[in-house]
Amino acid sequence: SYVLTQPPSVSVAPGQTARITCGGNNIGSKSVHWYQQKPGQAPVLVVYDDSDRPSGIPERFSGSNSGNTATLTISRVEAGDEADYYCQVWDSSSDHPYVFGTGTKVTVL
Amino acid sequence: EVQLVESGGGLVKPGGSLRLSCAASGFTFSSYSMNWVRQAPGKGLEWVSSISSSSSYIYYADSVKGRFTISRDNAKNSLYLQMNSLRAEDTAVYYCARTMTTVTTLWFDPWGQGTLVTVSS
């Protein structure tokens, strides 16, 4: 089945930019979605279809996808952005079609 | 407001059974595919099962196939997960999530708050 690899952790100072990668074989040919999960809470969608934002998600959250890497970028990081972030794709060719990345813990210094 | 509320979690012995429910509100439940996603303590997200809007299409992760059964009642705006032959590795928070789609992809939005299932003797 399709595998998505994320770095376990990313640290960033307030006001700086955090970049979270999601690696997969030719992931650029798929659409990537990103979820934010704060401790003790359910995941929340922050980016869908590579780069679209749901209503209510700040413009500071953006996404890109090309080649073998998709990236979630958080600009002007705030303390409230500290959370786990997961990428996800839909692999239509698989009988295990919903694939999540391994998750990245973002720490705001 | 779109809302999903899970219930039915608890402590169960290995080999036991449990039925989870998810009550949906704020949207036309019968028009959407629905899903169960779980998260073991301290671990990542794992898709468990999906069901289409009319129950015509059902999918399971290999880890639960043959033990779990997903179902829905559109008249009651409810989603269910019958879990049998439970194992310690099924211990997790179970989330209910709505499927959102475009022509080329699917994702989950929103998610319920989750219900904890603990399998232990």
Image: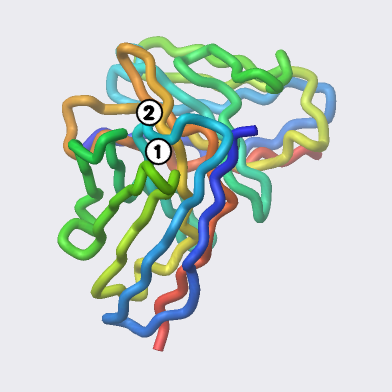
Where is residue B51? Give x, y as percent: 28, 41
> Residue sitting at 20 percent across and 52 percent down?
B62
Asked whether the viewer can see residue B28, the reply is yes
Residue extending farthest to the front is B75
Left or right, residue B84 beside residue A65: left
Quick one: quadrant of the N terminus of chain B? top right
Label 1: which secondary element: strand
> Mark 1 sits on what residue?
A100
Give the residue type at disc 2.
Ser
Label 1 vs label 2, nearer the camera: 2
Q: In this picture, is A48 found above or below B8?
A: above
Point out residue A40 in the picture as x, y percentages from the top left corner: 66, 55
Q: Decide: is A87 above or below B86.
A: above
- Of residue A19 and residue B37, the one placed in the foreground of this image is B37
Residue assigned mark 2 = B31
Label 2: which secondary element: helix
